Image (cartoon, rainbow, N blue to C red):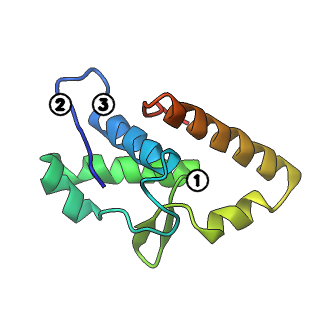
């Protein structure tokens, strides 16, 4: 998974990471269940503080974009699909989120925030 971080951008780095993970999922370059680089691996690659990456990952988890299982961060998997199938409200929220991701991917740009 490639990241293109712009330190001079007015967009905070953690939001750039969040947007790029969401974009990779929407464009299907990140597949269900695929491991996302750990905080320890990604921070030195991006030349950012580990807390910046951790904040981005926490935001992604809070949004339901990724799931943490046994200490590993993974792209949406069957767990997310089951969550979306849980009830009508959950299905509607998941459908809206998925449509948003597909629309952004179709236009070739990452989402700012879901």
Please state if 48 lies on the left or on the right of 111 as rendered: left
Residue 57 appears at what percent x and percent y?
A: 40, 53
Identify the image quadrant of the N terminus.
Answer: bottom left
Is the residue under label 3 in contact with that under label 1 (CB below 8 Å)?
Answer: no
Residue in view at x 81 percent, y 62 percent: 86
| Residue 84 on image: x %, y % | 74, 57
Question: SS class of the residue under badge 2?
Answer: loop
Q: Which mark is residue 27?
A: none
Q: Position of residue 46 (x, y in %)?
A: 17, 47
Measured Cα–Cα span from mark 2 to mark 1: 26 Å
The residue at the point 71 percent across, 48 percent down is 94
Horizontally, residue 15 falls left or right of residue 75, namely left
Q: Earlier in the sequence, mark 2 or mark 3?
A: 2
- Mark 1 residue element: loop
**Which residue position holds label 1?**
64
Q: Residue furthest top?
A: 10
Identify the residue shown where x is 48% and y is 32%. 111
Residue at the spot 78% in from the left edge and 51% down from the top edge: 90
12 displayed left or right of 32: left
Disc ID at residue 12: 3
Question: How far from the left and from the top, in percent, is residue 71?
Answer: 40, 74
**Residue denoted by label 2:** 7
Nearer the observer, 31 or 9: 31
**Between discs 1 and 3, the one toward the N terminus:** 3
Relative height, residue 6 to residue 55 (above, below): above
Label 2 and label 3: CA atoms lie apart by 8 Å
Which one is nearer the viewer's eye here, 100 or 9?
100
Q: Of label 2 and label 1, which has the lower sequence position?
A: 2
Query: Above or below — where is 45 with respect to 113?
Result: below
């Amino acid at each position: 998974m490639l990241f293109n971080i712009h330190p001079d951008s007015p967009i905070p780095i953690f939001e750039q990471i969040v947007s790029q993970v969401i974009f990779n999922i929407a464009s299907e370059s990140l597949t269900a269940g695929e491991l996302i680089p750990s905080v320890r691996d990604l921070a030195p690659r991006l030349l950012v503080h580990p807390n910046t990456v951790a904040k981005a990952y926490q935001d992604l988890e809070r949004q339901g974009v990724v799931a943490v299982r046994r200490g590993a961060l993974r792209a949406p998997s069957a767990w997310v699909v089951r969550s979306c199938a849980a009830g009508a409200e959950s299905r509607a929220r998941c459908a809206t989120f998925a449509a948003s991701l597909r629309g952004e991917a179709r236009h070739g740009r990452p989402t700012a925030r879901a």
